[in-house]
Image (tube, helix red, strand yellow):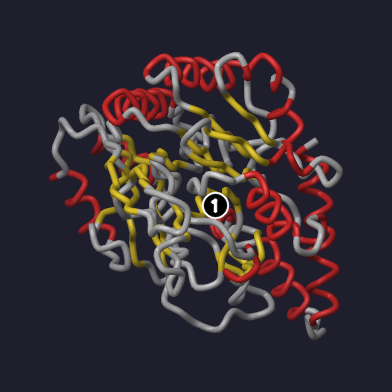
Amino acid sequence: MKILHTSDWHLGHTLYGYDRTEEQQAMLNQIEGIIKNEQPDAMVLSGDVYHTSQPSAAVQTMFTEAIVAMHQACPTMTIVVTAGNHDSGSKHEIFQTPWRALNVFAIGNIDKENIDSHIIEVHGKGWVVAVPYAYERTIPDGFFQQLLDRVSEKNIDNLPVVMMAHTTVEGCNFTGHDQIGERTVGGVDAVPHEYFGGGFDYLALGHIHHAQFIHNTEHRMRYSGTPLAVSFDEAYDHSVSIVEIDTHGALPSVKEISIDNPHPLVTLPTDTDDTATWEEAKKLLEDFPSDNPAYIRLNVGVEDFLPAGANEEANAIASGKQCRVCYINAKRPERERTQSEALTVQELQEIAPIEIARRYISNLGVQFDEDMEAMFKEALEAINQQGNK
């Protein structure tokens, strides 16, 4: 069986107020072209189709038109789409019935009563076990193994078995994501790779944006990564994965196919960990090629604050160029934060909610213990669930 593994399209994402429809459409067109050339038996889209749980009508139209075009590029291909933590599971399932006419399966929620709804047969080629994102506490114990055992009963021809999941797996490279402690990335707690049970040939993961195999899993667990960068910190190649599995039990072979962004995300200085003085940053922006339609982030080292009018000055320098200045990342020397020190709006946007809570509690002179952290996470989960309805 040959599959195209992709995830984390984040359709509808805007970058510092800039609309990204052109880039997102270019990404979809490239994936359509890859499907036409590769003719896979299945495409698996492992969550975070949209950037928000309430995408606009235009964004939803872009998605549906892309899926129709991908079907037409390979009419025999089975398409399986699962919801991610950014998606509304119920919205994914609204059009399940008409999608079936195009051999498209949309799985938005865990169905404990009908586990066969998570098992899709790719006729004569293999099986796809589709599990959408769900809070760990809402997934029955042993649910993944239960699904795999059910597939084993059905798989009399010993065909390849692919499982889909959208979560954080321990040991993954989370570059480009916010991390809370050692176990939570992007608001999702990490699980050990044993959590998924045994009996699959390939685990098609979503959620982490950096394409990678999970270590010590025989190259059977993989994040395809996002095909389009969502933040400046995702300073690595973006791609989709073509996975081929000969038979059940065989090791998968994987190749990455790069996706080009017509508006790349560029940090100046180009070493994203480095900073420049404000005068140096302005010179870098002046020297940036006029015909490069990139988004620009300036990393500027400051002792206190940027000069007044810095944003206007940067935009004036970029005037006449095709690039777009997104923001000036003012980096201060590391120092202990005092009780009276305030966070900037930029810092509030970049820091995870639980870290803000920790700092607030610390300033009150109270220890943020494990029980308080658990209650905070539970409250945050409840808010997220409400937003995804």
Question: For numbered disc 1, what is the local secondary structure?
Answer: loop
Along the viewing direction, whichever of 151 and 140 lies nearer the viewer: 151
258 and 52: which is toward the camera: 258
Mark 1 highlights which residue? 207
Residue 379, image x and y in percent? 84, 59
Considering only vertical position in the picture, is 356 above or below 252? Answer: below
Residue type, mark 1 in image? His
Image x and y of residue 42, in percent: 46, 33
Occupied quadrant, residue 250: bottom left
Question: Image quarter for residue 91?
Answer: top right
- Relative side of 276 to 155, left or right: left
Tell me if residue 88 comes above or below residue 144 in the rendering. above
In the rendered image, which quarter contains the N terminus? top left
User: In this rendering, does residue 87 appear at all?
Assistant: yes
Q: Position of residue 156 (x, y in %)?
A: 58, 46
For residue 90, side relative to residue 83 (left or right): right
Front in this rendered view, residue 33 or 148: 148
Left or right: 318 as drawn, with respect to 201: left
